[in-house]
Image (cartoon, grey):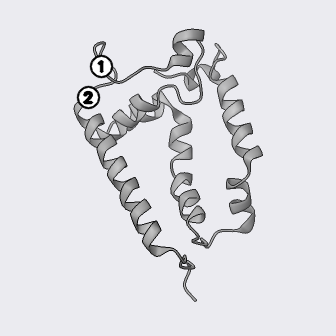
Amino acid sequence: MSALRQPRWRGWHAAAGAAAVAAAGAGVWVLRRVDPNAPDSPLPGCLFYHFTGLYCPGCGSTRALHGLVHGDLGQFLAMNPLLAVVMPALPLLVLHGMGYRLPLPKRAIDTLLSAKFWLGLMGGYWVLRNLPWWPFSWLAPG
């Protein structure tokens, strides 16, 4: 028995996978050529931060990914440390949603699929990264 159960809708999954790879490739292409840190950058900033002065859970993600595609892991971690933690889980969630059954403990899969887990993680991170004292101040972008 193989580690992954094959899904029924292989054609649809292949098209969705190709679209995801194309979108990721386009994103990498843009981030290789455009610096979101530059003052004249065409990439938009965070509207939530612009209007409230508070960091949302996604603040710094574009700059973090810019650092990642340029091999600057320090910038990647400094801009949005949660992104570094969540990124490995995304392919697992996508594969699970496509019908693959991964050889992970049921409790791990249930946790990753739990809305309570994600709401708690994002909500807690949102609050903590806006606290002005150490050690929470290092969660803010920059």
Whole-number angstrom distance, CA of label 2 to CA of label 1: 7 Å
Q: Position of residue 76 (x, y in %)?
A: 42, 35
Q: Judge whether residue 135 can be spotted in this image.
A: no
Between 99 and 129, the one nearer to me in the picture: 99
Mark closest to the chain's N terminus, 2 or 1: 2
Q: Which mark is residue 34?
A: 2
Identify the secondary structure beneath mark 1. Answer: loop
Q: Position of residue 115 (x, y in %)?
A: 73, 47
Q: Indicate left or right for 128 with 40 as reference.
A: right
Query: Camera-side residue: 45 or 77?
Result: 45
Amino acid residing under circle 2: Val
**SS category of the residue bearing label 2:** loop
Q: Residue at x 50, y 31 (%)?
A: 80
- At which x and y percent is residue 131? 67, 17
Q: Splitting the image into 4 quarters, where does residue 108 fall? A: bottom right
Determine crowd level at label 2: few under 14, some 14-19, many 20+ residues with C-alpha closer than 10 A.
some
In the image, is 137 to the left or to the right of 30?
A: right
* Residue denoted by label 1: 41
Question: In which quadrant of the rendered view does residue 3 lie?
Answer: bottom right
Quadrant, the N terminus:
bottom right
Can residue 107 be seen here? yes
Q: Are marks 2 and 1 in contact (CB under 8 Å)?
A: yes
Task: Give the residue drawn at x 40%, y 64%.
Answer: 15
Dot 1, how many residues are within 10 Å of its Cα: few (below 14), some (14-19), or many (20+)? Answer: few
Residue at image coords 46%, 32%: 61
Q: Amino acid at mark 1?
A: Ser
Residue 116 in the image: state x and y as whole percent: 77, 44
Residue furthest to the bottom in view is 1
Q: Is residue 75 left or right of residue 32?
A: right
